[in-house]
Image (cartoon, grey):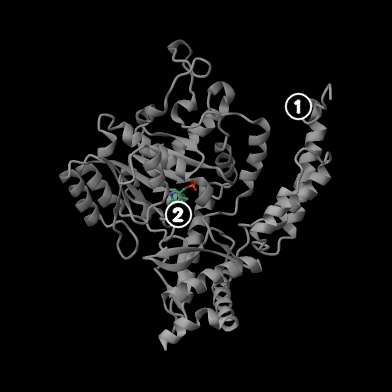
Amino acid sequence: MYPPPLHHVFHPANADHYASTVRAGLEHLVRTLGGVAGPATGRSVAGAAARVTAVDLDVPLGDTGAALAELSQVWLDDAVWFHEPTYAAHLNCPVVVPALLAELFIASVNSSMDTFDQSVGGTFVERHLVDWTARRIGFGRTADGVFTSGGSQSNLQALLLARGALEREPLGRLRILASADSHFSVQKSARLLGLGEDSVVCVPTDERHRMDPVALDRSLAACTALGLRPMAIVATAGTTDFGAIDPLPEIADLARAYDTWLHVDAAYGGGLLVSPRYRHRLAGIDRADSVTVDYHKTFFQPVSSSALLVRDGALLAPATWHADYLNPEDPAVASPNQVDKSLQTTRRFDALKLWLTLRMMGPDTLGDYVDALVDLARDTYVAVADEPDLEVAARPELSTLVFRYAPSGLDEPALASLNTRIRAALYESGRAMVAATRVDGRQFLKLTLLNPLATVGDIVGVVDLVRATGARLLADEPAAVASTLEVAR
Ligand SMILES: *Cc1c(COP(=O)(O)O)cnc(C)c1O
């Protein structure tokens, strides 16, 4: 059609259309929210796929109401809701309202963070937040950093920088030392950097799933003795499964002794930076060369919001590349371009979410939320640890609880199958969601607690639902575990 309809474009001439469309969307969302009755509806894979693939993308619906109704069908009606207190599966947080207000502005204004001339004040909002986070870490004046799409990208960039610091070393000799409980993005980053499958040395952990510094010392010495070069030590401040915080001061001593880059992956534990009561658990983080913080985990921000912080901003240089069309290398027109620090080029102004959050709520309220989660995990542990039909893998370090339903008389394969089926049954029921993981080869369930509105009663209720579901599955299908019961008898 010529001319095409132009009212879709964000423009002052279309302000009424913009406002009424966003308002209709907001009303639809609020209505949807009011009707949510649990963390999920349990829609099957096939059912979810069928609803979406039936849509003919070449035939638009035209009006907002019809599009919103279809949106409910393909997505919202069966969405997983992280604000529901019985959602306790992955590291997803309910999000705070100031950040949602920011999202509207981020998307509408659509600043791009690569260059100053596409963001102006936005560049300095991001830089101010980077400086704020660096100060919370305890870094000095030389510190810098950049927002990223998530912890995986932050970890990748950190390891890229560590690799850059040893430019002359052949790739095949470089080693990354990380604990057995570190995040899988460490392995993926090593692969992306071309370091080879053997490049990540897995350092054993103690009974609390923290990196064992004696074992780290031994691994570093062994690498050196073999003529290999330790490129980086990745300490985790809040492991994904156990929330374990590696002993940062001891690890920092070893990093210095072996002249090795220290990266602290605080994707999960970063929220402790604002904690009024548990900040001390991150003691030693200021001795890192680089730190990953995921604001979209323990700062209650919508995805995506993460940052990589470095002790010495000059070390971000490997991310700099000059292009005549974007950021020319010309001292006469030097401008503060964030692209010089980033792996991304066009990039969302995600920093604005944290900005409005801090300006409207303040860091202490965020920290109180984090503290509430730590307390919630501890109190839930106390409430369930001694139950005879439950096996709890470890005392919570942050806000996860790894456990399983383990009535007596079942062997390991039966317990694995039973707990896997409990998890699936909970999803199908729509009443609660839990995650799963393995501990020393044994199947467990995991509660990840990131909802400051959840109470001990809510979470003990989820555990009770796990037990009741397990008991029902055993009663309904004794055959499924009969063989193992025979063995046990
Ligand atoms: C979640 C997580 C990551 C990855 O972060 P994304 O934002 O999901 O990319 C890295 N490390 C740890 C310890 C994590 O928990």
Residue occupying the point 57% across, 71% down = 462
The three-letter amino acid code for the residue at tag 2 is Pro
Q: Which residue is farthest top?
A: 332
**For numbered disc 1, what is the local secondary structure?**
loop
Q: Position of residue 300 (x, y in %)?
A: 55, 50
Residue topped by disc 2: 276
* Badge 2 element: loop
State the image coordinates of residue 96 (x, y, percent, origin top left): 61, 50
| Near-viewer residue (173 or 22) | 173
Considering every residue shown, the one lying at the far bottom of the view is 489
Q: In the image, is 159 to the left or to the right of 59?
A: left
- Pointer 1 local density, CA inside 10 Å: few below 14, some 14–19, many at least 20: few
Residue toward you, 103 or 37: 37
- Ligand 1 within 8 Å of disc 1? The answer is no
Q: Which residue is mark 1?
A: 11
Rendered residue at 19%/43% (across/down): 257
Three-letter code for the amino acid on which mark 1 is drawn: His
Pinpoint residue 373: horizontal percent, then vertical percent: 50, 61
129 lies above or below 374: above
Mark 1 and mark 2: Cα distance apart in space: 44 Å
Quarter of the image for the N terminus: give it. Answer: top right
Among numbered discs 1 and 2, the one appearing first in the sequence: 1
